[in-house]
Image: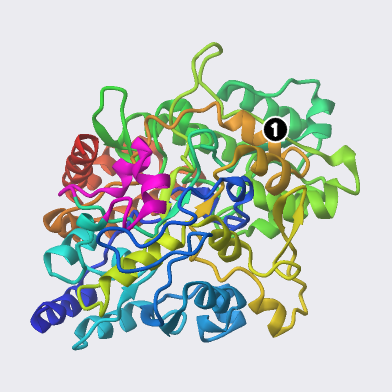
């Protein structure tokens, strides 16, 4: 590996913003409440148990499938989450990590940047004479210019493709490479396998979206109207709620008024990014003519007083408080927020204030639902073996072992009795007390280590999202397809990454600024064509071409 390549990386990191589709862009299972028990996954029979030393592999395996890593010490660059940092400054303090070291006969040494200094720390890392053995979540995907493709070209990462087989990676082969959907996601545009150790999110059965519209059923009943199906139904319902004395028939917070296509899907567009039209062409939703029609509806609702005027700054906690106080008739939010901030505090104590899910609306009755909801299927929390790794084969065995059922259970939930308890044969996370001791915090999941999440639909509906109307909402919103969404698995080459770094930030800033102006009326929608012309000058077509090329390559993998 050449040091001058790393120095070049620093200059690019400082001067360019790297856009990343890692983990789950628009994947709302990764937001609040995303980390959870693996549930039914722990019931899978471990097909690799009892595997002995095979042709090529120098490691032996016990009857549970654990490789003996022969006392290997792994150095790992690990970007900690806020919850990690609350518990410790060293990930090795976690009980689950200590148990992992014992199970696999190995040792971990962590390099973890302070919260908020990840980018600068990563730049320094790239300038060092020697990289750690592994780089975990957030490093390559978020901070390396050109992303994973450029990191391989610069010989920063070790290519382990030839090791992906039943001898070296039996668990990864069983769970990922045998699944055509995941296999396509695990391979890059050059045919390299690049996702060993990544977390499997969702499944074909449990391809869900966790955010959507919820309506106070008692307030709706007072209007005499049925659940709204179309945009016009929503307009009529909001008017009736307003007439009945509800202050804000529809309440947004600063994060919920865009980004999940709650209402824009009725117009066939993504309200916050790129999507695939029915003809296979990539488009940018806020550049489409239909975006004006969508904004017109929101503006009319805002002008009529149906939307809370402080939505650009108000928090979700504020919205939940107003909802409990009968000032709000409907919201759009993540089901974790509903369950933990409303059901537990309000609805469970007064069932008359129950929230019920509404389907994503359509324009005309009888129309089919579109394909513009976020998919929960992804590979995330990516982990990489560097070209400087002392023992790449040991790194491969470590990452493959993370998919073992007992190890994933431990890493997803922490210590039994501290992080979770077993209920009817499946793990259920325990609430962390506000005055939790350090020992209690270190008994929780270490986060960003487990390899299976939200893959078992029955577990999700019966154990994880089982409060109030959460199960009903998940079943209802699942009916909306995902076929028009940009894939979670696009990868960009060096030239495309440069284009994104040049133009993406200015485009997003301008779109967000103008969306607020159009909705609130400080900018007339009569000026929509001027807005589109401005996007053209900001190189929106170049960006669309980048996403089209990346989409074409993904579809050809």
Give coordinates of residue 524: x percent, y percent: 41, 41
Query: Is 67 situated above or below 362?
Result: below
**Is 56 left, or right, of 468 in this rendering?**
left
Residue 293 image-quadrant placement: top left
What residue does disc 1 label? 472
Quarter of the rendering occupied by the N terminus: bottom left
Magenta region, residue range? 164-191
Query: Is 219 situated above or below 29?
Result: above
Residue 37 image-quadrant placement: bottom right
Residue 468 image-quadrant placement: top right
- Frontmost residue, 174 versus 322: 174
Residue 175 counted in the magenta span? yes
Quarter of the rendering occupied by the C terminus: top left
Q: Quick check: can you spot residue 244?
A: no
Give coordinates of residue 15: x percent, y percent: 20, 74
**Is 93 left, or right, of 317 in this rendering?**
left
């Amino acid at each position: 590996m050449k040091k001058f390549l790393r120095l070049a990386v620093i200059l690019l990191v400082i001067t360019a913003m790297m856009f990343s589709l890692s983990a789950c862009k628009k994947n709302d299972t990764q937001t609040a409440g995303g980390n959870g028990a693996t549930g039914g996954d722990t019931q899978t029979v471990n097909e690799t148990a009892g595997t002995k030393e095979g042709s090529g592999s120098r490691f032996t395996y016990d009857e549970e499938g654990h490789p003996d890593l022969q006392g290997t010490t792994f150095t790992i660059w690990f970007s900690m989450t806020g919850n990690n940092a609350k518990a410790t400054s060293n990930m090795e303090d976690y009980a689950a990590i200590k148990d992992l070291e014992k199970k696999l006969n190995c040792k971990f040494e962590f390099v973890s940047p302070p919260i908020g200094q990840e980018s600068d720390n990563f730049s320094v890392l790239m300038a060092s004479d020697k990289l750690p053995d592994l780089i975990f979540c957030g490093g390559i995907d978020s901070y390396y210019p050109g992303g994973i493709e450029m990191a391989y070209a610069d010989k920063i990462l070790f290519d382990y493709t030839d090791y992906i087989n039943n001898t070296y990676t039996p668990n990864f082969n069983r769970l990922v490479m045998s699944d055509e959907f995941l296999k396509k996601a695990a391979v890059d545009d050059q045919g390299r396998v690049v996702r060993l150790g990544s977390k499997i999110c969702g499944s074909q059965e449990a391809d869900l979206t966790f955010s959507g519209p919820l309506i106070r059923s008692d307030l709706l009943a007072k209007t005499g109207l049925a659940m709204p199906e179309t945009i016009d139904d929503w307009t009529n319902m909001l008017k009736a709620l307003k007439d009945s004395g509800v202050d804000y028939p529809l309440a947004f917070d600063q994060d919920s008024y865009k980004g999940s296509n709650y209402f824009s899907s009725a117009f066939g567009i993504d309200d916050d990014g790129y999507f695939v039209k029915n003809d296979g062409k990539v488009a940018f939703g806020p550049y489409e003519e239909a975006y004006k029609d969508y904004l017109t509806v929101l503006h009319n609702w805002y002008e009529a007083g149906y939307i809370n005027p402080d939505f650009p700054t108000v928090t979700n906690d504020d919205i939940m408080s107003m909802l409990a106080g009968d000032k709000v008739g409907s919201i759009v939010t993540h089901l974790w927020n509903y369950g933990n901030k409303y059901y537990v505090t309000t609805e469970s104590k007064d069932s008359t204030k129950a929230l019920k899910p509404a389907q994503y609306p359509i324009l005309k009755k009888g129309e089919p639902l579109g394909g513009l909801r976020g998919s929960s299927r992804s590979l995330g929390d990516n982990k990489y073996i560097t070209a400087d790794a002392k023992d790449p084969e040991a790194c491969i065995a470590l990452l493959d072992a993370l998919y073992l059922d007992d190890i994933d259970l431990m890493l997803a939930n922490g210590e039994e009795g501290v992080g979770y308890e077993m209920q009817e044969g499946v793990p259920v996370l325990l609430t962390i007390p506000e005055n939790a001791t350090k020992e209690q915090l270190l008994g929780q999941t270490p986060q960003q280590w487990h390899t299976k999440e939200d893959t078992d639909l029955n577990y999700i509906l019966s154990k994880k999202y089982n409060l109030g109307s959460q199960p009903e909402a998940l079943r209802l919103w699942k009916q909306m397809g995902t076929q028009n969404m940009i894939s979670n698995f696009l990868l960009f080459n060096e030239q495309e990454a440069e284009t994104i770094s040049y133009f993406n930030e200015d485009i997003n800033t301008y779109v967000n600024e103008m969306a607020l102006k159009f909705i609130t009326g400080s900018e007339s929608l009569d000026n929509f064509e001027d807005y589109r012309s401005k996007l053209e000058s900001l190189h929106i077509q170049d960006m669309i071409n980048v996403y089209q090329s990346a989409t074409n390559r993904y579809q050809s993998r």
